[in-house]
Amino acid sequence: MSVRHFLSMMDYTPDELVGLIRRAIELKDLRNRGVLFEPLKNRVLGMIFEKASTRTRLSFEAGMIQLGGQAIFLSPRDTQLGRGEPIGDAAIVMSSMLDAVMIRTFAHSNLTEFAAKSKVPVINGLSDDLHPCQLLADMQTFLEHRGSIAGKTVAWIGDGNNMCNSYIEAAIQFDFQLKVACPEGYEPDARFLALAGDRVQVLRDPREAVAGAHLVSTDVWASMGQEDEAEQRMALFRPYQVTPALLDNAAPDVLFMHCLPAHRGEEISLDMLDDPRSVAWAQAENRLHAQKALLELLVEPAYHHA
């Protein structure tokens, strides 16, 4: 049996993705009602972090524990990976001892190389290309607050980064229109734009992008590893700050999302997260529930093959 991974939104069918999100909502309800549900008892998730993390680490670690399993945190300085062990070799060994592996890394090729040699599911906890787990949480949050996102319009304001690429994949899989407003030279990856065709529009003017949008999302202007460009970016991106006034150009029932951490006063105004249209806190919590649904889907079948 070939093992399933979750490296990108495109690894699943649209129906499977919607099913995952509906399951996440059920798991959230179980947790809110205090129901003990431990389908992953004695299962172990290995978590490799090359990039720092708050929400990704907390949500995967807490999620595994709540599902009855355990998670092991591995940073490159604690393992041979940081000292040049080939990724494929590490994958063979680690996947012989673990039930799933979550990797948060820089180069997306680290994920694909690991997955190619892994006997257990590999989950993308973020790469320079994509952040699909965040999009599961975002799509869950939209569904909870507004129902289906199919046919709606979404605006991405700011850097055409890994989050923006994942929004492009989500536009294809969840059937919405995406308008990206970014400065010249900071467009999303051409490969993803080509995949999406006329589903995605790249604009320069944030007001034009949010016009009629049902969801507006943004992210920090300088991602991890881009600290040296921060000052130059600050000047270029200034007109792309998301404010309540900018949101007034969107649909009356617009939602605002931010994958966090947020730099108040930069990509968002100081008061943006306190605006009633912001659902960033619910969105952050949903990382836990969406990833539990993903872990349940990927790890549980191991039982039936034991």
Image (tube, rainbow, N blue to C red):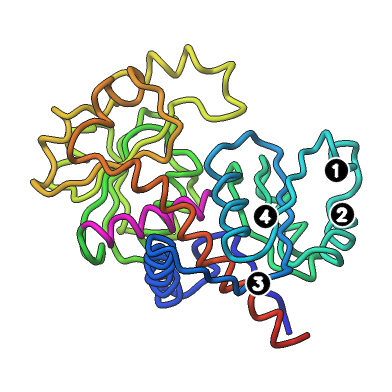
For marks 4 and 3, give the one nearer the viewer: 3
Say left or right for 101 vs 270: right
Earlier residue among tags 1 and 2 = 1
Q: Secondary structure at mark 3?
A: helix
Residue under numbered circle 1 = 81
Residue under numbered circle 2 = 90
Earlier residue among tags 4 and 3 = 4
**Residue at the spot x=73%, y=85% of the render?**
1
Task: Give how far apart the Cα atoms at labels 4 and 3 are.
Answer: 12 Å
Residues at discs 1 and 2 in contact (Cβ within 8 Å): yes
**Residue 10, image x, y percentages:** 51, 66
Magenta highlight range: 130-145
What amino acid type should be assigned to the residue bearing mark 1? Answer: Leu
For marks 1 and 4, give the one nearer the viewer: 4
- Label 3 crowding class (10 Å Cα cut-off): few <14, some 14-19, many 20+? many
Residue under numbered circle 4 = 102
Earlier residue among tags 1 and 4 = 1
Earlier residue among tags 2 and 3 = 2
Residue 238 badge: none
What amino acid type should be assigned to the residue bearing mark 3? Answer: Val
